[in-house]
């Protein structure tokens, strides 16, 4: 028999690849499940069509709907990570780490020297992810992220060198 054994219901390992405009609906669904104000399909279509935007998606076994993604905009030799999100069912599996490793490696290969991002101060999981990947806080925007029924959260501005 060949190496194509059936998976028998076991989760297939994720494969990370470049995102395509056809992924917009899947990315919008993940984003809506991850943030208070999710971006819609049209926003994702616009971003994915922009040649200065780099996005990577993870799919189980490399097929089907995305289970997570990372997206950045390039400006000269710098990049800003717009968003990293993982579908609720795929969280706490190491998928965000896999996406960040792939995404940062691709940014470095494209000649990016510095990467910036903003994260809500109260987003503990994202802050841990970024800390593990060498990002350091360089600034703060008070009351930046509105919260339903609560006080707005500060945005932490973070940076990492890819040199």
Image (tube, grey):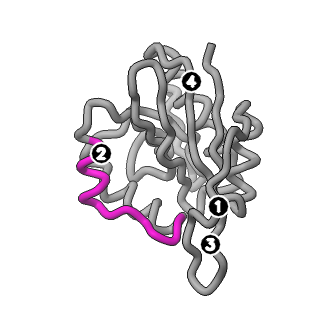
Q: On the image, numbered disc 1 is attached to which residue?
A: 142
SS for callout 4: strand
Residue 58 in sight here: no
Q: Which residue is mark 4?
A: 114
Q: Mark 3 or 1 closer to N-term? A: 1
Q: Secondary structure at mark 1?
A: strand
Image side of residue 98 versus residue 51, left or right: right
Q: What is the crowding at mark 3: few (fewer than 14 residues within 10 Å), some, or many (at least 20)? A: some
Residue at 49% from the left image edge and 36% from the top image edge: 80
Pointers 4 and 3 in contact (CB under 8 A)? Answer: no
Q: Distance between the Cα atoms at labels 4 and 2?
A: 21 Å
Q: Give, as a single range, the part of the protein colored magenta.
A: 35-48
Read off the residue under disc 3. Answer: 152
Mark in front: 2 vs 1: 1
Instruction: Quote the CA–CA distance across marks 2 and 1.
Output: 27 Å
Between marks 1 and 4 in the image, the one whose residue lies nearer the viewer: 1
Q: CA distance from mark 3 to mark 1?
A: 8 Å
Where residue 97 sits in the image (x, y, percent)?
A: 66, 39
Quarter of the picture holding the C terminus: top right
Q: Nearer the viewer, mark 3 or mark 1?
A: 1
């Amino acid at each position: 028999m060949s190496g194509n054994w059936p998976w028998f219901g076991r989760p297939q390992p994720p494969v990370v690849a470049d995102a395509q405009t056809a992924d917009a609906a899947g990315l919008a669904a993940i984003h809506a499940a991850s943030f208070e104000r999710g971006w819609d399909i049209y926003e994702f279509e616009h971003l994915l069509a922009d040649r200065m935007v780099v996005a990577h998606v993870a799919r189980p076994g490399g097929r089907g709907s995305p289970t997570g993604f990372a997206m950045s905009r390039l400006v000269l030799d710098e990049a800003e990570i717009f968003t990293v999100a993982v579908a609720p069912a795929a969280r706490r599996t190491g998928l965000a780490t896999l996406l960040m490793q792939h995404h940062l490696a691709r940014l470095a290969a494209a000649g990016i020297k510095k990467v910036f991002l903003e994260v809500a101060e109260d987003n503990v999981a994202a802050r841990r992810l970024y800390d593990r990947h060498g990002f350091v806080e360089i600034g703060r925007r008070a009351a930046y992220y509105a919260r339903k029924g609560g006080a707005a959260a500060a945005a932490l501005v973070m940076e990492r060198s890819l040199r």
